[in-house]
Image (cartoon, helix red, strand yellow):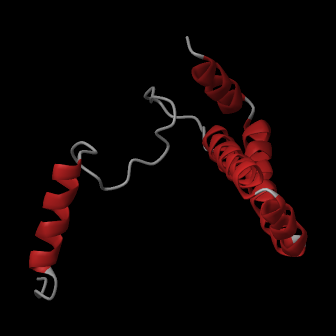
């Protein structure tokens, strides 16, 4: 059993913990926005001191921040369901097929051909 399935099983049994993970994701998102908007001039001055190193550190920090938000949302979205689902598939959406570029292009082309047609 993977770590993800263990955590999902635990949060299914303890819904308050799942709610805490969701709250942490929202708090982290708004804290990131607040801090980046409040200290934007200091951050930009620090980046300009050494663009390559500091720029890469800022990008890595943002990627880590987004990954943590994504992980918290996935753990927070684990609710009880009868069937066992895979990890990190909380919302499948309407996508069908694979994530290949050819399928995406064909879907886009099909969409563009039908734009403006009246639906019944």
Q: Quadrant of residue 84?
A: top left
Residue lying at 15% horizontally and 76% vertically, measured from the top left: 112
Q: Is residue 3 above or below residue 102?
A: above
- Residue nearest the observer in this picture, 4 or 68: 68
Residue pictured at 21% horizontal, 44% vertical? 97
Q: In this view of the protein, which residue sits in the foreground, 44 or 105?
A: 44
Is 31 on the left or on the right of 103, as rendered? right
Residue at the image point whose x is 23% and y is 45% from the top: 100
Where residue 11 appears, as percent x and y from the top left, is: 70, 31
Q: For the C terminus, give its image quadrant.
A: bottom left
**Residue 36 placement (x, y as % from top left):** 81, 67
The foreground one among 66 and 55 is 55
- Going by the image, does 50 lie left or right of 102? right
Q: Position of residue 35 (x, y in %)?
A: 87, 65
Query: Image quadrant for the N terminus?
Result: top right
Which residue is depicted at the point 71% across and 55% down? Answer: 55
* Left-right relation of 36 to 78: right
Q: Position of residue 58 (x, y in %)?
A: 74, 53
Q: How many marks?
A: 0
Q: Is residue 84 above or below residue 28?
A: above
């Amino acid at each position: 059993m993977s770590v993800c399935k263990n955590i999902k099983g635990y949060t299914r049994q303890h819904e308050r913990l799942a709610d805490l993970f969701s709250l942490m994701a929202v708090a982290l998102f708004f804290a990131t926005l607040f801090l980046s908007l409040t200290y934007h001039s200091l951050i930009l001055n620090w980046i300009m001191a050494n663009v390559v190193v500091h720029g890469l550190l800022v990008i890595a920090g943002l990627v880590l921040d987004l990954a943590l938000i994504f992980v918290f949302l996935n753990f927070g979205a684990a609710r009880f369901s009868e069937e066992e689902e895979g990890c990190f598939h909380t919302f499948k959406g309407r996508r069908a097929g694979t994530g290949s570029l050819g399928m995406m292009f064909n879907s886009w082309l099909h969409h563009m051909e039908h734009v403006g047609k009246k639906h019944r």
